[in-house]
Amino acid sequence: MLVFEGLLPLIAPQAWRETFKRMIDLKDGQLRFIGLMSLAAGLLLMLISK
């Protein structure tokens, strides 16, 4: 997981910064939805890779 998280700051640090700046402006509900979708995508990938 950390390998994937480290790729964007390594490859495109400016885009990584901009993404986090935009996330600050999101409402709590929007951040929760993003978290839910990330969690669902991770679970789906785990199920597919078995």
Image (tube, rainbow, N blue to C red):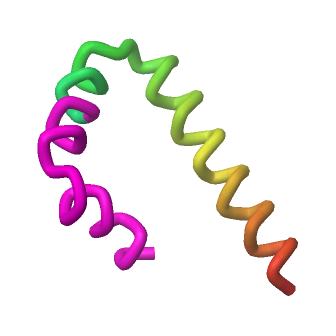
Q: Residue 22's x, y, as percent?
A: 26, 21
Q: At 26% from the left edge and 14% from the top edge, which residue is drawn?
A: 25
Q: In front here: 40 or 49?
A: 49
Furthest residue in direction bottom, as rendered: 50
By secondary structure, the bulk of the magenta-drawn segment is best described as helix
Left or right placement of residue 38 versus residue 6 in this view: right
Res 4 → quadrant: bottom left
Q: Is residue 7 above or below residue 18?
A: below
Q: Residue 24's x, y, as percent?
A: 23, 23
Q: Quadrant of the N terminus?
A: bottom left
Q: Quadrant of the C terminus?
A: bottom right
Q: Is residue 2 above or below residue 11?
A: below
Which range of residues does the magenta coloring cover? 1-19
Q: In front here: 29 or 16?
A: 16
24 is within the stretch colored magenta: no
Left or right placement of residue 28 versus residue 41 in this view: left
Q: Is residue 42 above or below residue 33?
A: below
Q: Residue 48's x, y, as percent?
A: 86, 73
Q: Is residue 13 above or below residue 34?
A: below
Q: At 19% from the left edge and 65% from the top edge, which residue is drawn?
A: 10
